[in-house]
Amino acid sequence: MDILLNVLKNSKINEEITISGSKSESNRLLILQNLFPEITINNLSDSDDSVHMQHALSTDKEIVDIGHAGTAMRFLTSYFAVKENREVVLTGSERMQNRPIEILVNALKDLGADISYEDKVGYPPIRIKGKKIIKDKVAINGNVSSQYISSLLLIASKLEKGLEIELVGKITSIPYIKMTLTLLNQIGIETSFEGNLIKVLPKTTVDKQTVVVESDWSSASYFYSIVASSQIGSSIQLSAYKQESLQGDSCLAEIYKHFGVATSFSDNSITLSKEKVSSKEVLEIDLKNAPDIAQTIAVTCFSENIACNLTGLHTLKIKETDRLEALKEELTNLGASISVTNETLHLEERSSIKENIAIKTYNDHRMAMAFAPLALKVPIKILDAEVVTKSYQKFWKDMQQIGIKVEEL
Ligand SMILES: O=C(O)C1=C[C@@H](OP(=O)(O)O)[C@@H](O)[C@H](O)C1
Ligand SMILES: C=C(OP(=O)(O)O)C(=O)O
């Protein structure tokens, strides 16, 4: 489905939107719930990625296909590796078959797991023969994807002696590792994280309990971008959020001050308000702790005519698409002066924004969603707009609610 986005007139926005649960928290809790049935989950994400996770955990088929869901691919690799008497072939979309998994597979094999590649070494599909793991110490590279580490952490307490993980090299996406540890602590599992050493103690059962998932902060980023481009006095209320978040992307509240967007927290919601004009200072940020909001920020800078230097983007090349190349291509088509390396993005101030440009989305939900707010400035087309469901089912409905006209082409 290709769509044209337009606004009739850029009037003041004043809307309330409810966003579904965090897909990162949800996909961790779904694994944990399977290991500890005492857990009930509230405000579970309705994203495709969480649906894939639920399906994978309930099927008894040999082939388990998780589509584009990185967290499902990585978390289920450890889950099935320790599931005795179960053999699966874990696979995913064409893109997933080109997203590396070798670092995690090698760590699990070091622990004694039985995993082999069905096709290309280092990539899904992988055949996993579940077995009892006896060892309790492993070392793993921390600079490629934190999901490998979270994957090990999620099953760690079910190993006889728990698990000690040594992180080698620089550690990327640390807030996601902390999210995993905090969720483990919340349900009653003891952990420690000192220097480059993480320990998880064994646990067979936990107390009966309900865990409430906070709504998704990465999804909130698109509303930050919209408010940044809206008239002073505009505001959008989003629920359900809290000030003490487990999600690293909550750093949006601080970052978007640069664009004149203030965030206020109330009981279970945040209100984003456009208070002043965006600062024209060059935006310099390291996003190694919050890679999923890089596309939103780059497009907001282009929209608001603010130059930026984004660093810490080395993980973007192995996500749903090579996000650095995709951003370069699409922003250039809109008239931007942009350059990228393997880990940085530099955008210069622009002269104008070209109208009616068709944005390619590369099977990446965040390409579609990050470019949508530009509709407040110019009519823009989004190709294959249905990609958004990977993380955000009702995205286009919510865009219409805030006043963006969505027309199917
Ligand atoms: O653990 C998680 O839930 C995630 C970790 C991050 O991946 P990397 O650690 O690969 O950067 C992030 O990009 C992804 O969307 C979700
Ligand atoms: C990178 C993402 O997801 P995943 O790695 O879980 O596919 C994302 O949602 O931006």
Image: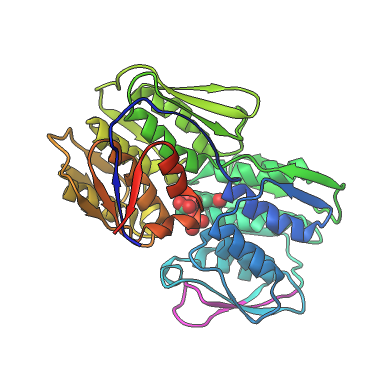
Image quarter of residue 66: bottom right
Asked if residue 327 can be seen in this view, the reply is yes
Q: Position of residue 336 (x, y in %)?
A: 17, 42
Residue 123 on the magenta span? yes
110 relative to 260, above or below:
below
| 380 within the magenta span | no
Q: Is residue 112 above or below residue 142?
A: below
Residue occupying image coordinates x 64% and y 69% = 56
Of 391 and 398, nearer the camera is 398
Q: Specify start and end residues of the magenta stretch as a single range.
A: 115-131
* Residue 144 visible in the displayed image: no
Query: In the picture provided, is 365 more to the left or to the right than 87?
Result: left
Left/right of residue 134 with respect to residue 66 in the rendered view: right
In the image as oriented, which residue stretches furthest toward the left? 351
For the rendered model, the colour scheme is rainbow
Horizontal and vertical percent for residue 183?
70, 44
Q: Quadrant of the C terminus?
A: bottom left
